[in-house]
Amino acid sequence: MQSADAQTPAAEVDPRRWITLAVLLTAGFMNLIDVTIVNVAIPSLKADFGATSSEIEWVVAGYIVAFALGLLPLGRLGDLVGRKRMFLMGVAGFTLCSALCGLSPTIDVLIAARLAQGFSAAMMMPQVLALVQVTFPDHERGFAFSLFGVTAGLASVAGPLAGGALISADLYDLVWRPIFLVNLPIGLLTILAGWRFIPNVSPSRRERIDVVGVLLGAATVFAIIIPLVEGREVGWPLWCFAMLAAALPLAIAFIVWERHRERIGATQLLPMSLIRNRHFLTGLAMTSSLFAGIPGFFFITAVFLQVGFGYSPLESGVATVPFPVGVFIASLVSGKFGSRAAKARLVAGPLILAAGMTILYAVVLSIGETVSQWSLVLPLFLCGLGMGITVAPLFATILRAVENRDAGSGSGALQSFQQIGGALGVAVSGEIFFRTVGETGAGAGIFREAFGASILFEIGVFLLLAFLSSRLPSGLGERDDRAHAKAPPAPPVEN
């Protein structure tokens, strides 16, 4: 793969880039934790509002849908109007919407606030990866991306832990509301630090947004996400399959339109150079595969431990701590490699994930009427190691196919496929798990069987990811490093 990013000459590297990264990681953590923290508040929300299952589902799903729909167009808008501006607007919107969530008087207001919060997250998150892409020189970028793996691992467990702790504390009789209000001081500090330390990278061009591309792209994502999010809850009616089938012609129409925009020399929502790039497309498929495994796994694990074996939300979160510990250790080690041995790590990481899941499957088969937290330590730690090894080279490899001027668009596409993969994984894992439980009744044995069946799906997903990684060209990172010396200079950084 040819290095397409415009590298920053050593003399122009921003000396404050590590402070910038800390700000970006904080925003990313705030978004990731908000996806999971709500799950532990579901019983409290039902009791407080007298809400239906459908309304509660939209508190969770509404955020995901709005986030997924906004990623690609808002990522592209950051390319055109300025990534720092879009990032700060996104963090400000996210913080305000967190306050609205925490102060919501009715379930309808909460759902609306969650939709707006997801849209605000879609404003800031494409800019996060794009700003790392254009701020760090190539030899540091691998380590910078590895820290996103650390952040993701910590957020995956910190959400249930923090949510359980805040709800159990019942601060000032606010019950569930602090899980949203805690974002206010974090968001305000992120805005102030971002305004001070994030560099203003000049947009490469001033052009109009591709409105038709936005509509077609949003319709395509909508046709995929909605059935995956809603399908299991509503029993997979015909309209779910009709929407999924409609996604293909919508995607074709989107590509045809983007090709037309390229011919007339107009800005494209997703540049045709990326659509034609085989390695970028392979990377998107790899992202979907990785995130089809992880969110679905943690969703099912929470149900397995809490409903099947009587764990509290806090106990369930503590039981999964070995996973982020593994992610943390592996991400730090993987980051030291930079872009070296990228392909080898992208193959090894998923294989370790699959091995960890295989051990977990054997553990689950041996479970009796209780689950010991200690029996989960080794397989979850191995899975965390595999995740940490994979994330840094995966993000860095995909974004190397993206020109600096299109970094927001490429980052938006990457995270859109991440959300689609996550929704797909939750849908399939949930269908496998709940169909098994529903057909055979209750009891520890039934939950053991259902969890084991869903783990087999996870193993298959990670083996698929290892296969896709093996199809990448050899010497991937080394070629990018050699190309670095010939890369054009970066866009100017304004003071």
Image: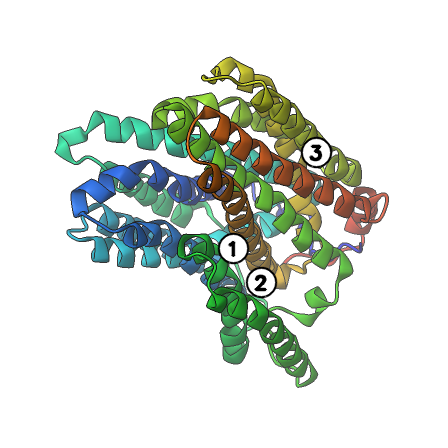
Q: Which residue matches tag 1?
A: 126
Q: Is residue 480 left or right of residue 395?
A: right
Which of 427/276 is in front?
427
Q: Residues within 10 Å of mark 2 (few under 14, many from 20)?
A: many
In the picture, measured across the screen, residue 236 lies left or right of residue 341, that is: left
Is 24 situated left or right of 387 in this image?
left
Q: On the image, which quarter does residue 13 sit in?
A: top right
Question: Where the N terminus falls, by quadrant?
Answer: bottom right
Distance of label 2 from label 1 (alpha carbons): 8 Å
Q: Amino acid at mark 3?
A: Gly
Residue 51, how many percent across, how many down? 22, 50
| Foreground: disc 3 or disc 1 | 3
Q: Tell which of 309 and 491 is nearer to you.
A: 309
Quadrant of res 166 = top left
> Closer to the N terminus: mark 2 or mark 3?
3
Q: Residue furthest right?
A: 474
Residue 349, disc:
3
In front of the other: label 2 or label 3?
3
Seen from the viewer's position, the closer of residues 448 and 197 is 448
Q: Earlier in the sequence, mark 3 or mark 1?
A: 1
Q: Position of residue 216 (x, y in %)?
A: 53, 75
- The residue that disc 2 covers is 409
Marks 3 and 1, how far apart in space?
Answer: 24 Å
Label 1: element kind? helix
Dot 2: element: helix
In this rendering, is residue 417 above or below 147?
Answer: below
Q: Amino acid at mark 1?
A: Pro
- Give neighbour class at mark 1: few <14, some 14-19, many 20+ (Cα, 10 Å): many
Residue shown at 19% from the left, 35% from the top: 175
The answer to whether mark 2 and mark 1 are in CB contact below 8 A is yes
The amino acid type found where label 2 is placed reads Ser
